[in-house]
Amino acid sequence: MKADEAYQCGKCGLCLTSCPVYRVTREETTAPRAKVHLIRSFAHDSLPATDRMQEKLQCCLMCGTCTNMCPGGVQHDILFMRMRQEMGVRRGRSKEVKVAEAILPRENRLRLASKAARLGTSSLAQRIIGRMHIGNIPIENFPPPNATPFRDQIPEIIEPSGRPAGTVVYFTGCATNHIFERTGHAVIKVLTRMGYRVLLPKNQGCCGLPLFFHGGIKQAEDTILSNIDTLQATTCDAILVDCATCGSALGHAYPQLMAELDLPDGPARRLAEKVWDIGEFVFKHFDQLAPHLDQERDKETVTYHLPCHLKNHGQGKNMVENLLKQLPHVDYQKAGDWDSCCGGGGFFFNEYPEISKKIVDGKIKNAINTGAQSWATGCPGCRVQLSGNLPQKGLLDVCHPMEIIARGLK
C-alpha cells in the first residue's frame, strides 16, 4: 500500500494537542501520530492487518485538524482514508459503512431510506419500538425527514428579487434535500433577496465524503464524477454549499481524490475554485444583504459552533461568527469552545459513543451557559450531534446560520 506521506511525520506531537479523541482518551494509540506509524509499519509488512489495528484506525473523527496543524505537511486524512480502504478489503467493513455504500450514491435509494426514517421517527413508531438509541442519541431526538425532498419542492432556476447581482449554483447535499428543508428555504430566501439568481441542478447527488472518508473510494467514484460533470456544466459566479462536509468534499477533497482514482484533476480543481460555504459567501457580500435586514426586530441571543470541516477547509475561520455579530437582530454570545469538535464525526458517534459523549457534553454545557436561545452551526452532522444530546429536547434551537439570517429579513 502507498504510504509515502507517513515518512513526513517527525513525531513532534503537535497533533496530540489538537486531536479531540486523544484529548479525551489520553491514549497514544488513538493519536494521529500513532496511526501514521501503524500505517507505515503495515505498508512495510512489519504489522499484519488485524481487528485490533482496524479498531484503532477507525477511532478517528476525520475532522482534519491534525492535518491542518502538522508542520511536516502530513496529509493524515488522505493517508487514513487509503488505509481504511485497505482494511475494509482485508478485514471487512462495518454494517454502518455497508449501508451507506448501498444508499448514499443512489438518489432513488436515498428517497426510500428517507421515507422509512420518517416512519421510524413518527410518534406512533416511538410508542411501538420504545426508547431506542443510535449511539447516545434517542431515536426521538433525530430530526424527521422532509415529507418531500427539498429539490422537488422548488424550481431548478429561481430568479432574484430586485436588481440582479449574479448567478450562483446551490449544492444542497443529502441533508438539506432529505432532512433540513427549513435550511434550504432560508438559503433561497437570503440569496434571492441579495439579488442572486439561484440554480439547483436536479442531477446533483451525495458529495460522497461519508463514503470515501470511511475507505469507500471506489464506491464513491461514480457520484463524485457525476457531481463534477453536473456542476461544471453550469455557468455561475460561485457554487454554494450549506454543509461544511459538502464544502470540504467539493472544495478540498475532490482534487486529491482524482490522484487516488488515477484520473486527471483539472475539472475537480476548476470546480473547487468556485466552491464557497454559504455563510462565508454571505459575509463576503454583506453589503448586498445589509439593506434587507430589519433594524427594528427584537434581538435573539445566539451562540455558534464552528464545524471542523469549515474550520480546516473553509475560506476563513472567523467569517461566519463575524457575520452573526453584524446582524442587527442578533445578540451574539461566544462560547469558550466555539471552534472545538462536537464529537459527531460521521458514524463515530455510533461506533465510539463513550468518547463522543465526553466530547459533546462539555460543548453543550458551555453553550447553555451563554444564555443563548439559538445554537447556530453549518454542518448537518453537528446539528444532529448537538441537538440529539441536549439534556432536554428543544432546550436550544440548533439551526443553520441562514435560518437566523432569514428570520431577520424585512
Image (cartoon, rainbow, N blue to C red):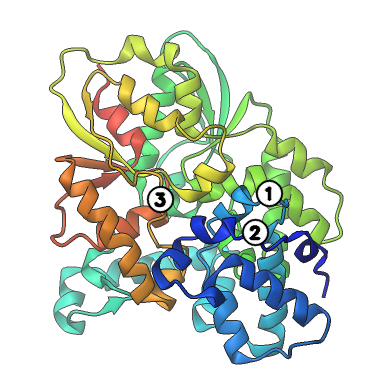
- In this rendering, which labeled residue sits more in front, label 3 or label 2? 2
Where does label 3 land, which residue? 340
Is 75 in front, or is 161? 75
Q: Earlier in the sequence, mark 1 or mark 3?
A: 1
Q: Which image quarter: residue 321? A: top left
Q: CA distance from mark 1 to mark 3?
A: 20 Å
- Asked if disc 1 and disc 2 are in contact, CB closer than 8 Å, the reply is yes
> Residue drawn 33% across and 58% down?
384
Amino acid, disc 1: Pro
- Regarding mark 2 in the picture, which secondary structure is present there? loop
Q: Is residue 149 left or right of residue 265?
A: left
Q: Residue at x 34, y 36 (%)?
A: 401
Q: Residue at x 22, y 41 (%)?
A: 374
Q: From the image, tell me which residue sits under label 2.
A: 12
Between circles 1 and 2, the one closer to the viewer is 2
Residue 215 place in picture, x, y as percent: 65, 71
Vertical placement of 185 versus 43: above or below?
A: above
